[in-house]
């Protein structure tokens, strides 16, 4: 699967808003949006008016960037959301929130979703007592996510626990900082998701 390898901050500048892709950097004065709040490139300061299709496409690309998901996988999630009962857009966001790398980030064990994905890849976390090294693994209500006993001294995890101690944990998750674990109380609802996404635009795009 192809992956974006250019400067992450260019994605935020292209969308004209913070996507919090760089962890603590996004909250500092080094944030590119704070320094250069216009699109990258020679003509970046000239923002053209987007067409209806362009607006829908931009919303999809923004959502993919938030969660670090490729096109093929994002399409798969949309098809899953469409086949479920309820509102397709809400189902889509719920599936994205249920990814293991996102849950690790939400619990504060990763400074960003990208770092959380890397930590999961390295086999640092287990779900219900079994090692899971697949970032796209979808958790379920009742699942317990924990740092493996022999990985609790991992530098990145220890730093994140301290730095993100004050970061609020979503109501659908329960965090235990002492045991470096968390529990999925229930799956996320639309009201729980704080990212500024207009999911109906994505549904309209894929419905054409």
Image (cartoon, rainbow, N blue to C red):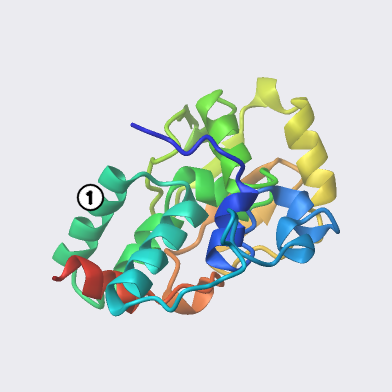
Q: Position of residue 118 (x, y in %)?
A: 57, 31
User: Could you tell me which secondary element the residue under label 1 belongs to?
Assistant: helix
Q: Is residue 54 above or below residue 127?
A: below
Tell me how many marks there are. 1
The residue that disc 1 covers is: 76
Q: Residue at x 42, y 32 (%)?
A: 134
Residue 87 can be seen in this image: yes
Q: Position of residue 208 (x, y in %)?
A: 13, 70
Q: Residue at x 56, y 23 (%)?
A: 122
Figure quadrant of residue 19: bottom right
Q: Residue at x 56, y 72 (%)?
A: 194
Q: Is residue 196 left or right of residue 49?
A: right
Q: Residue at x 59, y 68 (%)?
A: 16
Quadrant (top left/top right/bottom left/bottom right) for the N terminus: top left
Q: Is residue 199 above or below residue 111?
A: below
Seen from the viewer's position, the closer of residues 94 and 196 is 196
Q: Is residue 183 left or right of residue 149?
A: left
Figure quadrant of residue 17: bottom right
Q: Position of residue 53 (x, y in %)?
A: 28, 72
Direction front: furthest residue: 42
Q: Is residue 136 left or right of residue 85?
A: right
Residue 90 can be seen in this image: no
Q: Is residue 55 above or below residue 154?
A: below
Figure quadrant of residue 95: bottom left
Q: Is residue 100 above or below residue 147?
A: below
Seen from the viewer's position, the closer of residues 64 and 110 is 64
Estimate how packed mark 1 is, as few (under 14), some (14 to 19) or many (20 or more) residues with alpha carbons within 10 Å.
Answer: few
């Amino acid at each position: 699967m192809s992956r974006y390898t250019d400067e992450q901050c260019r994605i935020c500048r292209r969308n004209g808003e913070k996507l919090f892709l760089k962890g603590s950097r996004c909250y500092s004065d080094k944030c590119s949006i704070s320094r250069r709040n216009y699109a990258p490139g020679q003509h970046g300061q000239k923002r053209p008016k987007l067409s209806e299709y362009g607006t829908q496409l931009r919303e999809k690309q923004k959502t993919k960037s938030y969660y670090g998901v490729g096109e093929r996988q994002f399409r798969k999630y949309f098809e899953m959301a469409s086949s479920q009962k309820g509102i397709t857009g809400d189902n889509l966001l719920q599936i994205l929130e249920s990814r293991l790398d996102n849950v690790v980030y939400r619990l504060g064990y990763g400074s960003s979703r990208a770092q959380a994905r890397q930590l999961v890849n390295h086999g640092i976390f287990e779900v219900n007592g079994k090692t899971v090294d697949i970032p796209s693994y979808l958790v379920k209500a009742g699942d317990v996510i924990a740092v493996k006993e022999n990985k609790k001294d991992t530098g990145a995890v220890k730093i994140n626990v301290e730095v993100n101690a004050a970061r609020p944990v979503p109501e659908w998750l329960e965090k235990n900082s002492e045991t470096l674990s968390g529990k999925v109380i229930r799956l996320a609802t639309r009201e729980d998701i704080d990212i500024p996404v207009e999911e109906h635009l994505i549904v309209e795009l894929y419905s054409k």
